[in-house]
Image: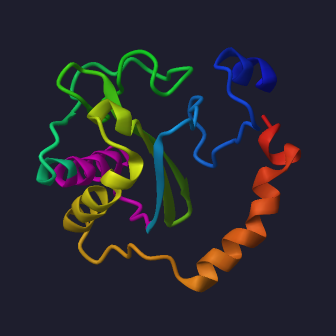
Amino acid sequence: QASAASGARGIAGPLVRRATGGGVVFHDGDLTFSIAFPWDRLCSPGLIYKNIHRGVHVGLKGARLKTAIWSGADPGPAAQCFVGAPARMDLVLDDGRKLLGGALRRRGARGLYQGSMRPERLGKDALELERPIADGLAEEFPGLVLTLEPEWLARGSELAEKYRSESWNGRR
């Protein structure tokens, strides 16, 4: 199944299972980012999703890039992230094409957001969008830490083996 999915797009390389679940995302030039945060038990997933996407929208707007938060009907889960109609609170372009989508996962009082954006839809490359996105998220979430501590990077390296393994990525 994995080789058929990647072969259909002509993409070489392994498929990776995201901790947040969700549909298939082909990482072929997209900009991806994750946000780990404390999750107040009274805060709804929809509000968190909206606030993250609003922060990205504000940052892109500050860079004079036109986007909007999708408020139309939610089409339900998609098989592929950037194919088909956007979900409610996704970031879209003027023509309604999805620009940024993401997924959330909660474990106890901690949350994880994993987002994926198609920078070419804005006529930009990923590096040109990093600063506006970071600025918008920092405005939306005062106190947000936008740096990676050395011990976090070391722990990430330790976990890389687990998350690259077939037992993790092939799990259903």
Image spot of residue 167 (x, y percent): 87, 45
- 151 vs 104, left or right, is right
Q: Which residues are magenta?
A: 38-59
Image spot of residue 135 (x, y percent): 24, 64
Q: Quadrant of the N terminus?
A: top right
In the displayed structure, 149 sits above or below 137; it is: below
Q: Which is the main secondary structure of the residues drawn in magenta?
A: helix
- 122 vs 26, left or right, is left
Image spot of residue 108 (x, y percent): 56, 63
Depth check: give the residue in front, 76 or 4: 4
Depth check: give the residue in front, 62 or 50: 62
In the displayed structure, 62 sits above or below 122; it is: below
In the displayed structure, 90 sits above or below 6; it is: below
Which color scheme is applied? rainbow
Image spot of residue 152 (x, y percent): 60, 78
Depth check: give the residue in front, 13 or 56: 13
Please tell me which residue is depicted at 32% across the width and 53% down the height of the picture.
128
Q: Quadrant of the C terminus?
A: top right
- 52 vs 162, left or right, is left
Please tell me which residue is depicted at 56% across the width and 20% down the height of the picture.
79
Which residue sits furthest right?
A: 167
Residue 57 is covered by the magenta coloring = yes
Please tell me which residue is depicted at 72% across the width and 36% down the height of the picture.
15
In the displayed structure, 157 sits above or below 88; it is: below
Please tell me which residue is depicted at 21% across the width and 19% down the height of the picture.
95
The picture quadrant where one finds residue 39 is bottom left
Total count of labels: 0
Residue 29 is covered by the magenta coloring = no
